[in-house]
Amino acid sequence: MNLRDVLRNAATNLVDHAFRSTLTMLGIIFGVGAVISMLAIGAGAQRQAMTMIERLGLHNVLVRDAGLRDEELEEVRRNSLGVSPRDGLAIQDAVPGVELVAGRVDINSYLVLAAGVTTTADVRGVSWHQRELAGLALAEGRFLDAADERDHAQVCVIGPGVRRDLFGYGPAVGQDLKVNDVWFEVVGVLAGGGSGAGAFQGVAVASSDRAILLPVTTALRKLDREPLDAPLDELVVRLDDAQRPTVAAGLISALLDRLHAGAHDFKVVVPEALLEQSRRTQRLFAIVMGCIAGISLLVGGIGIMNIMLATVLERTREIGIRRALGARRHDILALFLVESFSISLAGGLTGVVLGVAIAKIIAASAGWPTVVTAFSILLSTGVAMVVGLASGIYPAMRAARLDPIEALRYE
């Protein structure tokens, strides 16, 4: 028997027993689908984690307001002003390896208005270094500069969502908009494609799409804040390559404890540590899902072996006739191995379609990013084919070892 005859016989037998073959494939289908969807979710989570970390700054340390309740703040403010520019100056002077410290203040905006049109936005006072710290790109105009910050200029840079709401498709740079009771000139528009607001490992990440960025000094001097609020909501501490963020975070915490008289009205966030924690979580997730997928493939392999053994028993007389007509043992072996391999291959390809569909459904319904890679498809189908071959070896060897005379007598 040549390879073409073997393939034709395997295909004919699978088609003749289509329902049985489909049931046999289910374990492989679900196993491959689970592997692909699991890897797609993991890859999507990794991409999202890297996007969030890039926005936070992998080599930064963040000092954020602790967000205490009002009743707690009344007691704390007797000893501590909260996160403030003074803290930034102290960190710059006392902590080795600090390249720059940039403050941020969030403004409670009850009115954002331009040309009679109102919208909602995240109004933030930021340092002129914010563009390089957060990797912001501009679509129009310019970003805030040192002169704006020094002169408390009433200028702003807006996100694409705010531009769309207030100015439509007309020019935005040079237009005026009002935040609460203060007018600002738009000097720049951020590029589209920015991520929305979110959270990473419990740490809030601000949106750039609906942002209005003001010079931090202007926000502090010209826009009102609640009396008990800290002067700043965040300090971004950028370190040089020689300084480890975790080491710097310990020094910053100790320094601020003294400056704040032991008041726990701040928290120190290390994006590098958050990324490592995310990776540990993803590894655990991958192990658990891999075990589940492996069990599904194992069950599928057992199902293939079981059906192939039944097929050998069912086709004993056919095997005897083939041997009597000149088929050799390796021909019989190849016949059943190809049949087993075909079942696993068909199941694997169907599982690929199922896995991709599951990933797309998760992305569409839950808003969770998924990334289907060529590696996941090759890995899952490769494992499925190996399982199919391994499951078919014993039944094929049993069929090949049948005595032709006894096989012909089998009823």
Image (spheres, rainbow, N blue to C red):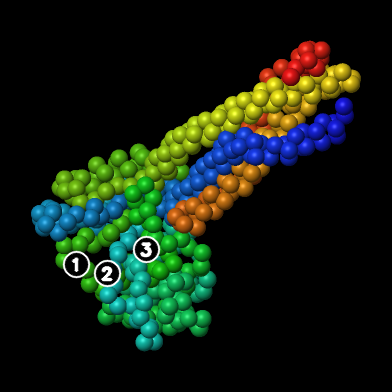
Q: Tell me, yes or no, if residue 244 can be seen here.
A: no
Q: Is residue 204 left or right of residue 190?
A: left
Question: Which percent across, then down, holds residue 318?
Answer: 79, 24
Label 1 with label 2: CB-CB less than 8 Å: yes
In this view, 266 is above or below 218: above
Q: Is residue 365 left or right of residue 116?
A: right
Q: Mark 2 Cα within 10 Å, few/some/many (few <14, many 20+)?
A: some
Q: Which residue is mark 3?
A: 127
Q: Which residue is mark 1?
A: 226
Which secondary structure, mark 2?
Answer: loop
Q: Residue at x 19, y 67 (%)?
A: 226
Q: Residue at x 43, y 64 (%)?
A: 208
Q: Residue at x 11, y 57 (%)?
A: 71
Q: Mark 1 Cα within 10 Å, few/some/many (few <14, many 20+)?
A: few
Q: Which residue is mark 2?
A: 108
Label 1 with label 3: CB-CB less than 8 Å: no
In this view, 14 is above or below 61: above
Q: Quadrant of the C terminus?
A: top right
Mark 1 vs mark 3: which is more N-terminal? 3
Q: Quadrant of the N terminus?
A: top right
Question: Which percent across, then down, holds residue 308?
Answer: 67, 26
Amino acid on which disc 2 is placed: Asn
User: 240 or 267: which is nearer to us?
Assistant: 267
Q: Is residue 112 left or right of residue 86?
A: right
Q: Tell me, yes or no, if residue 55 can be seen here.
A: yes
Label 2 with label 3: CB-CB less than 8 Å: no
Disc nearest the viewer among 2 and 3: 2
User: 70 or 81: which is nearer to us?
Assistant: 70
